[in-house]
């Protein structure tokens, strides 16, 4: 589960990590009022950021620095009245419904700090770099030596000596070392206490020296948290932070029926049982020249109702030009899928090519059900194996697409 930046800042603040003063606004008048509070508190410049689950906000114009209320109002008006389009959103963009209004800080140096699961080491790992403020993927590609990884002990967590050593490696000096190490320790505790899968501060910054802070202050400016969905039952307070407006509606519908669904950019819908088989199905579709439109795992014990809903979800995507069903019956019996296909044909309708490959438990009964329903489902073909299924659906979608293109040019 993802949360917004303003929520992540709040979690950091609750963990005792220094963050600039901030507030959240859901309308232009609210944004102006929150900006006024910060200006009245003596802050000279504030930053206004769109709260969406996507990167590239700055380049898209959805992060603005302002120094007066008129500019704050203009920035808020722009963000609330336009969709944010970036390299992560696609051309359709995202609607902005919340803004972060925060004190801007003068920055002397930026760093990157995160904790996530390193599957190769089978442990939580601190990832840090002295090249903060940009996407860590860019740093990893251009200068991998600039990324430092520190594995955390699975029971003891991050140790104080590790945090101080990392602070020195990153180039912190003087009192900055203690501040940075303290943030690392508190971030590690927050990661563990919340069952997070990722916590990220980018940038972690050092402000210029002043009379009160001769070595500057170390602050967290931008934060990101992601949580393990399987552990949310232990954190009802975190579950309340979920924002359904930031999620794909089809993916939310799938969750209600216990289905694992992820929308993709292709045109061949896939309905499969088992995550590994689903991945293999998408791979073989691509191998034969097709593009999967989704990952959809109905699991091993889905009801006919859930499977029918799976078809509805797939067909609700206008980009889908064909559907491939690939079921290996174990707990999930093939005849249940076959009956769900027939029910879906009656209730939903298959106006695009459908290729079905079934093997395993009750496959003979399933094939009989499909054979008897063939007249009701003229768009359906049955396949002998997975390769046959993939070649059939790719060919059928290609033929249908070429036919529509030819009709459009007449």
Image (cartoon, rainbow, N blue to C red):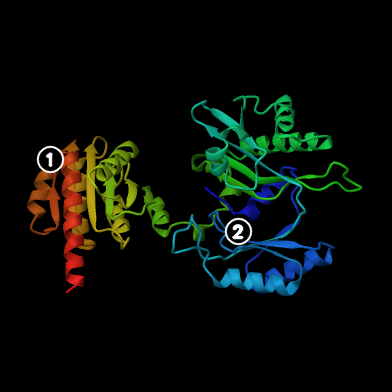
SS class of the residue under badge 1? Answer: loop
In front: 298, or 199?
199
- Give yes or no for contact between labels 2 and 1 (Cβ–Cβ under 8 Å): no
The residue at which mark 1 appears reads as: 384
Q: Is residue 312 above or below residue 151?
A: below
Q: Which mark is residue 42?
A: none
SS class of the residue under badge 2? Answer: loop
Q: Is residue 359 left or right of residue 2?
A: left
Q: Which label lies toward us, 2 or 1? A: 2
Q: CA distance from mark 2 to mark 1?
A: 51 Å
The residue at which mark 2 appears reads as: 58
In front: 292, or 317?
292
Residue at image x 49%, y 40%? 230
| Quadrant housing the C terminus | bottom left
In front: 73, or 368?
73
Residue at image x 78%, y 38%? 179
Q: Is residue 143 left or right of residue 361?
A: right
Question: Which residue reaches farthest front?
Answer: 142
Residue at image x 48%, y 63%? 93
Q: Is residue 350 visible?
A: no
Residue at image x 79%, y 66%? 37
Mark 2 / mark 1, whichever is N-terminal? 2
Q: Callout 2: few (<14), some (14-19), or many (20+) C-alpha neighbours within 10 Å?
A: few
Q: Is residue 245 above or below residue 197?
A: below
Name the quadrant containing residue 28. bottom right
Residue 260 x %, y %: 38, 46
Residue 302 x %, y %: 31, 45
Q: Is residue 226 left or right of residue 364?
A: right
Question: Total number of numbered labels?
Answer: 2
Residue 35 x %, y %: 74, 67
Residue 387 x %, y %: 18, 40
């Amino acid at each position: 589960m993802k949360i917004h930046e303003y929520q992540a800042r709040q979690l950091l603040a609750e963990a005792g990590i220094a963050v600039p003063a901030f507030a959240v606004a859901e309308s232009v008048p609210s944004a102006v009022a929150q900006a006024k509070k910060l200006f009245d508190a003596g802050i000279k410049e504030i930053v206004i950021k769109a709260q969406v689950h996507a990167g590239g906000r700055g380049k898209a114009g959805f992060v603005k620095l302002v120094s007066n209320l008129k500019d704050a109002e203009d920035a808020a008006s722009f963000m609330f009245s336009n969709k944010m389009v970036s390299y992560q959103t696609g051309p359709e963009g995202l609607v902005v419904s919340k803004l972060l209004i925060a004190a801007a800080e003068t920055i002397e140096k930026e760093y990157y700090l995160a904790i996530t699961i390193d599957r190769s080491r089978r442990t939580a790992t601190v990832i840090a770099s002295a090249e903060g403020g940009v996407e860590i993927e860019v740093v990893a590609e251009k200068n991998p030596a600039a990324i430092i990884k520190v594995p955390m002990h699975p029971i003891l967590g991050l140790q104080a000596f590790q945090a101080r050593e990392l602070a020195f490696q990153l180039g912190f000096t003087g009192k900055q070392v203690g501040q940075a190490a303290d943030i690392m320790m508190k971030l590690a505790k927050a990661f563990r206490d919340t069952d997070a899968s990722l916590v990220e501060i980018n940038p972690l910054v050092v402000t210029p020296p002043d009379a009160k802070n001769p070595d500057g202050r170390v602050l967290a400016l931008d934060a990101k948290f992601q949580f393990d969905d399987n552990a949310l039952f232990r954190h009802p307070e975190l579950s309340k932070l979920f924002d359904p407006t930031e999620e794909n509606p089809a993916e939310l519908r799938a969750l209600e029926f216990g289905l694992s669904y992820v929308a993709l950019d292709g045109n061949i819908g896939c309905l499969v049982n088992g995550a590994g088989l689903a991945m293999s199905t998408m791979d073989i579709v691509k191998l034969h020249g097709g593009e999967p439109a989704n990952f959809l795992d109905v699991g091993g014990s889905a009801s006919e109702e859930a499977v029918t809903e799976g078809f509805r979800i797939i067909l609700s995507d206008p980009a889908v030009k064909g559907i491939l069903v690939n079921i290996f019956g174990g707990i999930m019996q093939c005849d249940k899928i076959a009956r769900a296909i027939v029910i879906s044909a009656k209730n939903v309708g298959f106006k695009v090519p459908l290729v079905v490959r079934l093997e395993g438990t009750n496959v003979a009964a399933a094939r009989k059900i499909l054979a008897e329903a063939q007249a009701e489902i003229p768009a359906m073909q049955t396949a002998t194996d997975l390769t046959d299924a993939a070649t059939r659906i790719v060919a059928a979608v290609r033929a249908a697409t070429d036919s529509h293109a030819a009709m459009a040019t007449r």
